[in-house]
Amino acid sequence: MHIYRSSLLRFADDGRAMYDEDGLLATAPGDDGRERVVAAGGWQALSPQLLGQAGGEAVVHHLPGRIIAPGFVDLHIHYPQTDVIGAPAPGLLPWLENYTFPHESRFHDRAYADGVADFFMDELLRNGVTTALAFATSHPASVDAIMTAAQQRRMRMIAGKVLQDRNSPDGVRDDTEQSLVDTETLIQRWHGTDRLGYAITPRFAPTSTPAQLRGAGELAARYSDVWIQSHVAENLDEVAWVKELFPAARSYLAVYDDFGLMRERAVYAHSIWLDETDRQLMHRTKAAAAVSPTSNLFLASGYFDYLKADEAQMLYGLASDVGGGMSFSPFRTMQAAYVVGRESHAKEGQSLSPQHLWWQHTAGAARALGLQGVIGNLQPGCEADFVVINPRATPLLARKAEQARNLDELLFGMVILGDDRLIEQTHIAQQV
Ligand code: GUN
Ligand code: ZN
């Protein structure tokens, strides 16, 4: 058993933060050998019994001045766009055409994909991200590369081969039938292997034929615990294009519903330009939105409407959307979400609380994936993926931390000023 003594941040079932200034986190291997949380709470309350019970077997780690918090969950990211960050474009569609598609065409080469996947995984860890729902490219080898890189690091990673059989240039466009055969092969190879999961990944409605979307929906029905990931209603030009391509559909989101792609474990990035019926569809089907604020600001796509999402009781969580997004750091994403939240909460004159922002990037994102109680939290039973945060990592952060009078002020300082410098250590559950 490992026993950590530090401040401890975790979340109650209703999303509220729980914080122990002098906290204790105990972990031990479960029946399957995977390290899990066995106790979490206050040091004074828990340590006598735990230390007595574990005797000399316990390894105690004392981390004064540090905060242990759940590893961050990135609900939407593109590993092949690691090197596309910061590519300027007037909007989504020219950005895809001029930067993203040409770059992604390089991932047919397994050695190239391996190099980027290794860098990507290390960058996630450096930023405290322990799980991501990731796009690969349309090349099956790009999935093998990211799965292998995650497996080597024992990470819980979910990824999939992009499906795009039309309106895509040579080099990334795939073949309808072969793409579905490849998807099934990859599901069988990777889904449930160690901590890995597969996501059926139609890029977005404009780049898939109805036949490809139908095939994706059939696979989603056949493999019901596999994830689905795509993009929806990110940009107004994109929305208009979908209307031309699918004139019979009630809305952009309804295209996915028409092909059986709305269900639990389906995650739709952006979800900005939805109407009330769309939001009800999200709620009813338990599909989730991946809110990607740094990407939406970078590409001038629009603002996710938090107020309406809450009214409709939609599931959502935070995502970097690198390389449309501007940073791998969950702190940068939470900062941007705070700013975006001002837009939808304008009437109330304020935005989202730091506790809620943090939840959206941990326990909330895990819930959106159907992985509540598994990752994104540090309650007993959760897998032991966590970060060690130094809240005084920079001179200015140290001043903020000293002056914080309560948990909200402490978390707010980190949300607004934070970046990778806050992450002192990222711990991935051990396997024995
Ligand atoms: N829509 C279709 N493909 C993409 C992508 O790669 N990034 C973003 N942000 N939106 C998309
Ligand atoms: Zn994306």
Image (cartoon, rainbow, N blue to C red):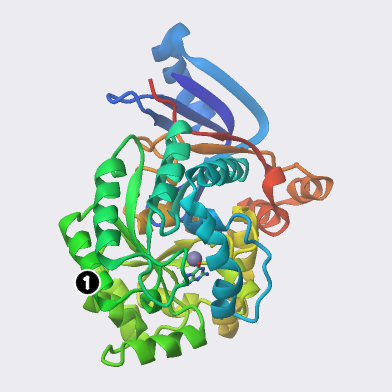
The residue depicted at 37 percent of the width and 75 percent of the height is 166
Residue that extends furthest to the top in the rendered view of this protein: 56
59 is higher (above) or lower (below) than 396:
above
Look at the image and tell me whether residue 362 can be seen: no
The residue depicted at 39 percent of the width and 75 percent of the height is 207
Look at the image and tell me whether residue 227 can be seen: yes
252 is higher (above) or lower (below) than 84:
below
**Displayed quadrant of residue 54:** top left
Q: Which residue is mark 1?
A: 214
Is the residue indicated by label 1 positioned so its CB lies within 8 Å of ligand 1?
Answer: no
- Where residue 196 sits in the image (x, y, percent)? 36, 42
Residue that extends furthest to the right in the rendered view of this protein: 395
Badge 1 amino acid: Arg
Q: Residues within 10 Å of mark 1 (few under 14, many from 20)?
A: some
Label 1: element kind: helix
- Foreground residue, 93 or 292? 93
Residue that extends furthest to the left in the rendered view of this protein: 222
- Where residue 376 sits in the image (x, y, percent)? 44, 47
- Where residue 11 sits in the image (x, y, percent)? 45, 49
Q: Quadrant of the C terminus?
A: top left
Q: Quadrant of the N terminus?
A: top left
183 left or right, relative to 47: left
- Foreground residue, 25 or 220? 220
The residue depicted at 64 percent of the width and 27 percent of the height is 63
Count of marks overlaid on the render: 1
- Foreground residue, 177 or 66? 177
155 left or right, relative to 411: left
154 is higher (above) or lower (below) than 145:
above
269 is higher (above) or lower (below) than 224:
below
- Foreground residue, 306 or 47? 306
**Displayed quadrant of residue 102:** bottom right
418 left or right, relative to 184: right
